Amino acid sequence: MKLYYVTLNTSQEALQIGRVLLEKRLALCVNWFPITCAYIWKQEIIEEPEVVLIVKTQDGYRQKIQQVISQHISYTNFIAELTPTNINQGFLDWLNTEIPTSSALAQESEKN
């Protein structure tokens, strides 16, 4: 299982990207929430609103997820791939039922 932590400018971007990821079965579940971001830009500290999108999916989908994100935004954002170490079995069962693993996708492609 992988989690992707993605920063965006608006909840609308998170909604659009999240829906596409779900529709393309690149994610099992997405969450987004507003935060405040503080960062250094040209030697000044800037504070502004930001939205975090969390994507819950199988391993091996990073490139496809990044492609979807780049189709919806044109600015440089942050995408971090995280690997949880302990996940409840019920969630893993749901994930494995709904979203194919990348190895299963590769095997399906070889058949076609």
Image (cartoon, rainbow, N blue to C red):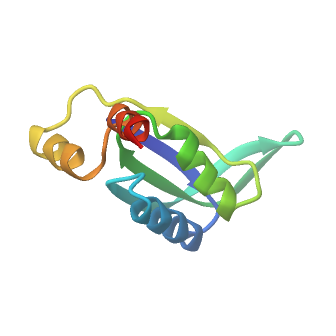
Q: Is residue 58 left or right of residue 93?
A: right
Quadrant holding the N terminus = top left
Q: Quadrant of residue 106?
A: top left
Estimate the x, y position of residue 56 in percent, counting from the top left.
36, 47
Of all residues shown, which one is farthest toward the left? 90
| Residue at 59% from the left image edge and 68% from the top image edge | 13
Task: Give 77 or 95, whichever is nearer the viewer.
Answer: 95
| Residue at 45% from the left image edge and 62% from the top image edge | 33
Q: Is residue 34 above or below residue 42?
A: below
Task: Give 47 or 21, whichever is nearer the viewer.
Answer: 21
| Residue at 36% from the left image edge and 45% from the top image edge | 57
Task: Give 60 or 69, whichever is nearer the viewer.
Answer: 60
Quadrant holding the C terminus = top left
| Residue at 49% from the left image edge and 70% from the top image edge | 15
Q: Is residue 81 above or below residue 50?
A: above
Q: Is residue 83 left or right of residue 63?
A: left
Estimate the x, y position of residue 78 in percent, counting from the top left.
63, 43
Q: Is residue 8 above or below residue 95?
A: below
Task: Give 18 or 59, whichever is nearer the viewer.
Answer: 59
Estimate the x, y position of residue 79 in percent, counting from the top left.
58, 42
